Amino acid sequence: MRILLTNNTLSARAGSEMYVYDVACQLKRLGHQPVAYSPDLGEVAELLRVAGVPVVSRLIELDFRPDVIHGHHHVETMTALACRDRVVREANVPVEQVQMLLNFADMDRFLPRKPLPDKPARDCS
């Protein structure tokens, strides 16, 4: 499967940057074709390249249409979603076959809290 991972930066070793690195490396080990996209490249982009994961700073550099787009951060994800529209338009893929999965959460782990009271209480201690 061809998977495009987006992030606002791949410059320094930080949270979402290292998440993209870990996911991309694991996808590659599983036999997929991950590519990382960010307009801001640096140390993490180089780590990805050394690991054999292609990195692009412009989506025009992609040499394939992704089967899956895993997006972080609004601007970069919306930019990548333009690929989705292009797949529908140019490859004649029925729009019903193109799925978008929004953020996930483990609803067994993250339970809704109790409703807030109508009137806030004061803690005067």
Image (cartoon, helix red, strand yellow):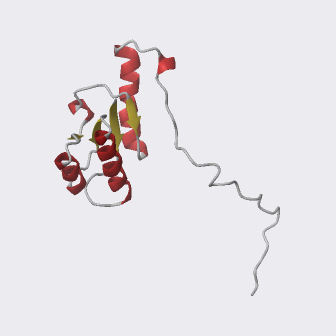
Residue at 38%, 59% in the rendered image: 15
Locate residue 4 relative to residue 123 in the image: left or right.
left
Q: Quadrant of the N terminus?
A: top left
In the rendered image, residue 73, in percent from the top left (x then y), is placed at 41, 47
> Taking the image as drawn, is residue 8 in sight?
no
In the rendered image, residue 90, in percent from the top left (x then y), is placed at 34, 15
Please tell me in which quadrant of the rendered image residue 5 appears: top left
Viewer-closest of 49 and 94: 49
In the rendered image, residue 118, in percent from the top left (x then y), is placed at 82, 61
Locate residue 68 relative to residue 32 in the image: left or right.
right
Residue at 34%, 34% in the rendered image: 3
Q: Residue furthest right?
A: 118
Locate residue 120 relative to residue 99 in the image: left or right.
right
Q: Residue furthest top?
A: 92
Viewer-closest of 117 and 71: 71
> Taking the image as drawn, is residue 109 in sight?
yes
Locate residue 99 relative to residue 115 in the image: left or right.
left
